Image (tube, rainbow, N blue to C red):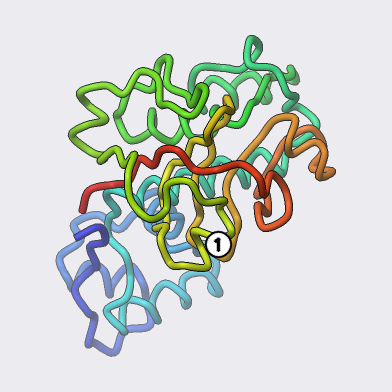
Amino acid sequence: MAKKYFKKYTGKSESIKAAMKSIGVKDPSLEYRKKIGALNNLSNIGTAEGNLKMLKLLKKGKLIKSLTGKDLFIHHMRAIHKYIKKHGGKFHYGYSKAQKTFAKAKEKVKAGKDTGLTCVVPTRWAMDLMGINPSGFYGKDGKFTKYTAKMKEKLTKITTGSAIGLAVKQAVDKGLLQAGDILVFKDHTHTVAYTGVGYFVFDGGTAAEKRGYDNVGIILDYSVVDKNYKISGILRWKE
């Protein structure tokens, strides 16, 4: 299971801390609740509004406790792109100037310095956050480089099948892609991760610049851009 939920709260307390303690959470501190809030796309945790939203999910048995696999990957990608969008002026196309990890990139931005970004960098940062060493990983001429043993534990490489040879729009229309799929394209040095929403993929770099994303791609719509890029390989998360 990619998602785990807290036990459903059936009590009458309007306190999120009391409710979480009653279902077995030993220390529902604000720091802990903020982490859980992030997993559930909840903001303002610690305020009356934020706490109420969390309590409602807990009462429904829909408050996510942990994520694994593709769900965790997508969570990290969304957080990374939200940060890039907020601090877009500090991120510029350039692999040589990109930081190796998301934490290092944030440190650099916090210090008022610029950092680099390319199409594959957000994907590599998300993999790093999941404990997968992404050093040297990218898509070159339609093939994955540095497909490591750790990656093989977590992902399956697909190079044949119905989605191979299609553009992203075609593959999505036919229902052949899954959220979290990492894609490479025939005859191109390019890597993107499919969001599972419409034709949107996470991306960065020059292709995104052409679409007016202030030097970086937050989410790029491939139903229009690069429609001639043909999928040659997919890394798909194992359940």
Residue 172 can be seen in this image? yes
In percent of width and height, residue 188 lies at: 59, 28
**Does residue 215 appear left or right of residue 41 in this picture?**
right
Residue 46 can be seen in this image? no
Depicted 75 relative to depicted 11: above or below? above
In this view of the protein, which residue sits in the foreground, 12 or 219? Answer: 219
In percent of width and height, residue 61 lies at: 27, 79
For label 1, the SS is loop
Residue 128 image-quadrant placement: top left
**Does residue 28 appear left or right of residue 117 in this picture?**
left
In percent of width and height, residue 142 lies at: 48, 29
Instruction: Pick the quarter of the image with the C terminus.
Output: bottom left
Instruction: Pick the quarter of the image with the N terminus.
Output: bottom left
Residue drawn at (31%, 65%) of the image: 64
In this view of the protein, which residue sits in the foreground, 153 or 186? Answer: 186
Residue drawn at (75%, 36%) of the image: 88
Residue drawn at (55%, 43%) of the image: 230
In percent of width and height, residue 180 lies at: 41, 50
Depicted 227 relative to depicted 215: above or below? below
Residue 109 image-quadrant placement: top right
**Does residue 210 appear left or right of residue 45 in this picture?**
right
Pointer 1 residue: 43
Depicted 52 relative to depicted 133: above or below? below
Residue drawn at (42%, 63%) of the image: 40
Q: Which amino acid does label 1 sit on?
A: Ser
